[in-house]
Image (spheres, coloured by chain):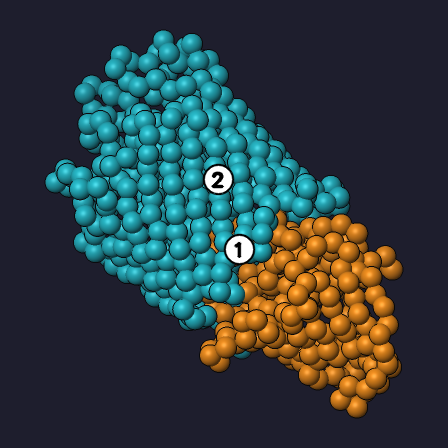
Amino acid sequence: MRPFFFGLLYTLTWSASTPINAADWQPEMHGFLQAHGASRMGGVECPAQTACDWPYNEQRFQLKLEGSGLEVSLGYAAKLDLVNDAALGDSDLDTRELYVDYNTERFTVRAGRQVVTWGVADLLFINDTFPKDWVAFFDGLPLEYLKLGSDALRIELFPEFADLQVMLADFRKDSLPDRDRFILPGPAISADLDEPSELEASLRASRYFGSWDGAIYLSRTHYSAPALSQIAGQWHGEFPRLNAYGASLSGPLWNGVLSLEAGYYDSVEDRNGTDHAVENSQTRFFVAYSRQIAEDTTLGIQGYAEWMYDYDAYRRALPAGMPERDELRTVATFRFTQFHLHQTLRLSLFAFWGGSEGDGYLIPSVRYAFSDDLWGEVGANLFVGDRNGQFGALGDNDNIYATLRYAF
Amino acid sequence: MRLINPQGKERKREMTLLRKNLGAAGEQRYYIYFHEPADVKGTAFMVWKYPAREDDRWIFIPAIKLVRRIAADDKRSSFVGSDFTYEDVSGRDAADETHSLVGEETLDGRPVFKIESLPKAKVDYARRLSWIDRERGLPLKEEYYDVRAELLRTFTTDEVREVDGHWTATRRTMHNAQSGHRTEVVFDEVSYGVGLGEELFSERYLQRPPRQWIR
């Protein structure tokens, strides 16, 4: 975290002149013990450096502390994970969240490591440019591990016409499938990554229009995956600049929920599309509908499209032998969720289908709550279809997983 | 709220429920914050309830700081796995059923109206009998029957207290006659007319619970 944030934490914590009553500040303590394992399916042969049979095998202890003081105008929270990663022979203290809050009637401030989720899509992201952990997701860790915390200052303002959120954050890259746990196509490339040092800035303005939720989003950020290029035989990766502008709308329709979201990705460093390493500008759009179809049974469908600009320039710049992407990439998703036994048993299927790339990704799962404190889940991550597609490329990484969590 | 299965195994939900009535037309706002169990602590529901159309409903999932609008049919959805539906918690629209007075009697020493209600649209029950306290206006018992006249669920009011001039059912039970599962609700603290602002029922407060009301 930068000195900027420490300074702010200090100011927020000590500028109040009211004497501090220690009893007010006592934290509430919770957490969990969790074991998670994912086993590779299909008898695939792995390169030597890849955790082959068990790409995930970890035990995790999470401690969650929360408290407030000064008549609740100040608050703090910490979520700290102690992780034993038996698959890679590693252990680590992972600061998932660590922040302080300052709340007033007209504005709130949150400073520190925090998770932020924007947008209305289900597992598709357009205006949420915040960091994500796709490694955890593809190996079946609980959904919360898809989101990584940002070291950020978040200010919320509440004028009459809308709620405004302003985020100023350090850049944090996505955690993408690597060769420690995944079998990936193509040769292994080792590259020096150069992470951006300037602050990322994002704005969200939201309001209700009757029963509809509307929001607009502006982000001055960077692509969260690196653009790789070769200079004098050495691979080098940078995270190109990205400006994203978008909007979303969500509301009731025929006893269900209709959601729409769109965004324009302005690829600042490749506006004419001639640099094959850097993404071209895009428009992204999705429409979704979800509805309860029977008792404790919900169905959701989404259609998503990504339109690449300057496609001809992209094709001209593409080096020979590299797979060519489509000008219009489409993905449909399907979610089925059903509860049984007083919602202690959850059956779920989430499926991505890449319409343009001819590939797919299926996530069936069953979760059972043995008690209020203990639940277990078994499921699978199955990648099917064309090996040149974004999901199909992970075809050697099908896995079944199991998670057991005891919460306190 | 205690969820008790036929073997006597219990699960417990502890929550704060804030409600605001908007005008006389029956429009209401609900905010429900979960304190227990630990794994769902911080989860919050918000409902904008309308008398003549489907409610708007949102959930806040604290683990990913996500506010999401949820699609749920309040007549058929169990409220957090309990024997109560969402509609049992937030109240049923009187115009959804036709009602007839079938008798006046006493129940546990209280004078009651016995009322038969038949739903107009297809729901999970075909007939409902209610015993309403004539003086306090509270339902003391309800029985839900299916089309074959078999008992589905029984609601009972187990404790009544007068709070701030309002008669209030402070202990209530819903028993599922078919499965043997039951749910008991105890209201530890009840207050009326505390001056909840309409702005509490918004995304802002789903993200950050109003600590003045939720401790």
Seen as rendered, the residue at the extreme bottom is B109
> What shade does chain A have?
cyan
Q: Which mark is residue A339?
A: none
Location of residue A38 with respect to A199 vertically, above or below = below
Q: Pick the quarter of the image with the N terminus of chain B.
A: bottom right
Residue underneath mark 1: B61
Q: Which chain does the residue under circle 1 lie in?
A: B
Residue A160 seen: yes
Residue depicted at 68% across the width and 57% down the height: B123
Residue depicted at 47% across the width and 26% down the height: A330
Q: Position of residue A1 (x, y in %)?
A: 40, 49
Seen as rendered, the residue at the extreme front is B148
Location of residue A84 with respect to B164 vertically, above or below = above
Compare residues B43 and A29 and report the one nearer the observer: B43
For marks 1 and 2, give the CA distance.
21 Å
**How many C-alpha atoms fall within 10 Å of the one at disc 2: few (<14), some, or many (≥20)?**
some
Q: Position of residue A377 (x, y in %)?
A: 37, 58
Question: Residue A368's image quarter?
Answer: bottom left
At label 2, which amino acid type do we have?
Answer: Phe
Q: Which chain does the residue under circle 2 lie in?
A: A
At label 1, which amino acid type do we have?
Answer: Ile
Compare residues A155 and A303 and report the one nearer the observer: A303
Q: Which mark is residue A334?
A: 2
Q: Position of residue B15 (x, y in %)?
A: 60, 70
Location of residue B5 with respect to A333 vertically, above or below = below
* Colour orange belongs to chain: B
Residue depicted at 75% across the width and 84% down the height: B161
Question: Residue A261's image quarter?
Answer: top right
* Proximity of marks 1 and 2: CB atoms separated by less than 8 Å: no
- Which tag is nearer the camera, tag 1 or tag 2? 2
Mark 2: secondary structure:
strand
